[in-house]
Image (cartoon, rainbow, N blue to C red):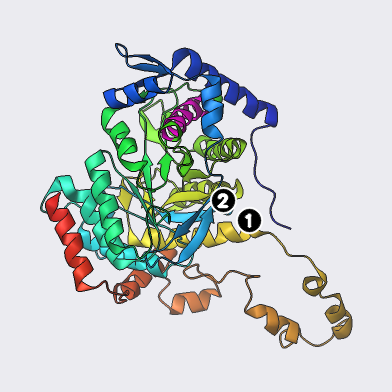
Amino acid sequence: MKLSTLCVLSKSEIKKIHEASIDILEQCGVKILNERMLSLLQEKGLDVNLDSQIVRFTRSCIEDSLSTIPQQFEVYNREGDFAFVLGDGNSKIAAGHNAVFWVDSETGKTRPSTVADVELSARICEELEHIDVLGIPVMPQDVPDPKASLLYGVKACIENCRKPVFFSSYTAKETRYCIDLLKAVFVGDIKTQAYGICQISPTSPLFWEGPVIDTILETVDTGVPIAVLPEPIAGISAPYTLAGLLTMNNAECLAGLIMIQMLRPGTKVMYANSWTTADMRTGAALVGSTETTLCRIAGAQLARFYNVPSHTTAPNSDNHAHDEQNAWEKSFSLFCSVAAGNDLIVNCGMFATGMTFSHEQLIMDDEMSAISQRIKAGIKVNQQTIAKDLMKEIGPQGETYLTADHTLNWLGSNEYIEPKISVTGPFASWEANGAKDTYKLARQKTIQYAELKTKALSSNIKAKLAEIIASF
């Protein structure tokens, strides 16, 4: 059987968080710095104070809006081919997005990121079996116009990888141009087929900035799914307790989901979270802490309670080096996210609290994804896998199982994962091959991937992409 889905909240505890969130949205409301949205919500019958810019949501409005959210939706690749379903409880893993710095593969030093870094990252994602979605890893720093940095990142990704795309933008204009870039390369109909997913975030506590609301207004009619990802910080922009942090995230996320559904019922959305705790000794924000990982499990439970596809961030680490802390924070955050049934998990390749990206980390995270998915898959127990007849046939101190047909038949199955960079085998062999650790083996893989070429886009499409960015 499969591994039991991880849970940290009981049904009654989920209900308490839900009721507290409803009360907050009804009695306290959220602040929205966007006149157009305020007017639209007022027209829908909500209690809107135009002076304070506070909107209060009724219970019936919340329940009606939640009922129109699609429980799952299909996702497609660049060529218009079906890729997977989001919302079926089977986790899909994505490369990270919106870092700033890059670890240079040759020097091992952290430096500003480049378009070339993004291009190679996308080519690597094309090859990695356990990376299902392409994130825009960084805002490259070597572009002619810094305001168009995200667009250059999107362009570099979609030119070099066919997998579905996850992106996060701040302004409506950025969003519109990102979607135009996706439309230019996508073979299918982006209005009905999800090729890209747009992430937007409120500002904690209970506050929506004008440009973010403009992004919602810009996106709802495009057909592009929207992930609503609050980022409250425990003890700073949310209560210090984990239950308080969960409730703040829940109220903020529900507010976003409700607004989107009121504007266009049936819009594809995701219940998202990026929990942050704080080291009160230093004031540092933490995304790889044990407590954020607990919340990732709870977030998946809350999303299932609302029947909305879920998204969280992992594998996360706050360390600045590829070391043991990096490994344990990433392993726990990713495995718990997968085992809890989060539908989309984004951040492979990133570390240093999401500020830094490296090709080597991306490759190591792909291996972590394989391990996490394999553990969740559990153990298949049936007559064939128990192999009772084979054991009886070979008997006590019988011949080896090595050449048995049963072994050969299962050798090529998914019973065991095949490590790509994990160090295995005897010490002598490892030493003879240069005594490379996993980071050095990942660097070796990076060099190999750098020589690969992906299916090239036509010159007409490339020209169209360049034209879109120039017009921005």
Q: Amino acid type of disc 1?
A: Lys
Residue 438 higher or lower than 214, as above or below:
below
Q: Is residue 306 visible?
A: yes
Is disc 2 placed on a helix, strand or loop?
A: helix
Determine contact: label 2, label 1, CB under 8 Å: yes
Q: Which residues are magenta?
A: 244-260
Alpha-carbon span between mark 2 and mark 1: 7 Å
Q: Amino acid type of disc 2?
A: Val
Q: Residue at x 26, y 71 (%)?
A: 457
In this view of the protein, which residue sits in the foreground, 325 or 251?
Answer: 251
Label 1 sits on residue: 376
Graded by Cα atoms within 10 Å as few (under 14), some (14 to 19) or many (20 or more), the crowding at tag 2 reads: many
Q: Is residue 104 visible?
A: no
Residue 285: x percent and y percent?
38, 33
Is disc 1 placed on a helix, strand or loop?
A: helix
Label 2 sits on residue: 338
Q: Quadrant of the N terminus?
A: bottom right
The answer to whether 342 appears left or right of 166 in the picture is right
